[in-house]
Image (cartoon, helix red, strand yellow):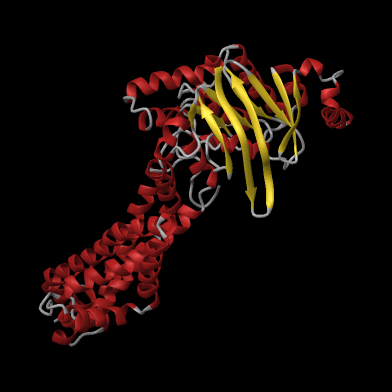
Amino acid sequence: MTTDDIILRVVGLHKSFGTTEVLKGVSFTVRKGETKVFIGPSGTGKSTLLRCINQLIIPDAGQVYLHGEEVTHAGAKINQYRAKIGMVFQNFNLFDHLTALRNVEIALMKVKGMKEAEAREKALFELRRVGMEDRADHYPAQLSGGQAQRVSIARALAMDPDVMLFDEPTSALDPELTGEVLEVIRSLAQAGMTMLIVTHEMRFALSIADDLLFMEHGTILESGSPADLATSPNFERTRQFAGRFAEL
Amino acid sequence: MDISAILIDWFPFLVTGIIATVGLVLSALGVGFVIGLPAAIGQVYGSRPVAFLINVYVWFFRGLPLLVLLFLFYFGIFPAIGLGDVSPFIVGAFVLGLHGGAYQAEIFRGAILSIGEGQMTAARSLGMSRTQAIRHVILPQALLIALPGWSNEYPTVLTDTSVCYAIGVAELLTRASVIVSTEYVAMPIYLACAGIYLVLNYVGMKGLHLLERRVSVPGFESGGD
């Protein structure tokens, strides 16, 4: 592994909300094409961690580097970094006043400065990639949750990000709609996209992760290859957590 | 002289009153919009001093009766700044505009605040600046949400214009009163005047409903979610 392969480096992130310390020094590196999956109980800082990476939440301490450039304390340049860090939200957060197509186009035009025709072509390409081209003219209110989430993935992909952050992308979906979204994410992994995924879908996590990270109380407690989950002593607490899921 | 002859005689005179009334309405809605929308943005996104100043403005113009405002400006503030010979119509249009702006600021502020935080977050996550996010994501949605409430301003503002009678603006009610005091017939003239207000109300509301239908977006329909 050369240092050129490292896309994202997170060093000692700390974040408190009031007196609650949500992140207590989280560090890791992400290689190109790698899929890191964060699991763990709710309220252990997984979502906060993702939001600290693109500075939607400003960490109290620690640094984030994208291709070796510091994203933390980036000032106005933060918008350039954010354009390279795609984010997919639990509640989709599609722009409700715009059609699916316009949702994907708008940042291409306003942030990347593309002309409308070029943005349209790119947006249609991305919608095709997530199987939503035939819904291009639908408004968010006219889409199912699964469809909306696929559009939001297309919106993030259209920016040609270096890394994609998925913040519980299927938590707001009916069980029968999660499959279509997970399929899209799986296809991205196969296409070599670098991804950080926070999820409660254990089976999906195990099948897609190159690196599985178990977070609890604001720290990465255990991590490693999912292949080692069943046997490795590294994963004792994770097994206990995953076992609780299996019983359900 | 029978009443229809009187009305026909005075018709051109009444029409100038209608024009003045419509002018006052347009100022209340138009100037009110130009002031109200930025005021709402300032209240929600502005720095603390900016938001404070806007709050004072809104409090002042919503807190005082329209008639008191008209007297204050016509007899007090305009003469005090050397604009004593400005026409009553200009003062009326000015006050109705500021008054409308304060009410519209509240309508737009409510609309902006009703938009989920996720919209701003998503826009910022794509690399939009705060200003871009407000302009391309928040405001278009706020306008769609505010439109029904904003349309409701129209009948209020239309009836409010008649208060300008008190400072001698040559609007519809003033014109009607002149006819009454000249011809010594009250009720038919005031009924005709009332009829004209109702027609203006009907036409304006029809137009606004057309506009609402024109710009409607699935998920933003008025009266339901």
Examine the rendering and report whether any part of residue B160 can be seen: yes
Quarter of the rendering containing residue A110: top left
Looking at this view, is B59 or A8 the one in front?
Answer: A8
Task: Give the residue displayed 23% in from the left and 64% down from the top.
Answer: B22
Would you place residue B83 above or below residue B206 in this image?
below
Which percent across, then down, holds residue B77? 21, 79
Left or right of A205, for residue B208: left
Which percent across, then down, holds residue A131? 55, 18
Examine the rendering and report whether any part of residue B149 can be seen: no
Would you place residue A88 above or below residue B202 in this image?
above
Task: Give the residue displayed 33% in from the left and 25% down from the top.
Answer: A116
Task: Give the residue displayed 50% in from the left and 25% down from the top.
Answer: A68
Would you place residue A166 above or below residue B187 in this image?
above
Which percent across, then down, holds residue B181? 17, 87
Quarter of the rendering containing residue B3: bottom left
Left or right of B2, for residue A107: right
The quarter in which the N terminus of chain B is drawn is bottom left
Looking at this view, is A61 or A22 the one in front?
Answer: A61
Which percent across, then down, holds residue B72? 26, 82
The residue at the far right in this view is A247
Looking at this view, is A227 or A135 the one in front?
Answer: A227
Left or right of A136, for residue B34: left
Left or right of A136, for residue B160: left
Total numbered circles: 0
Would you place residue A191 above or below residue B223 in this image?
above
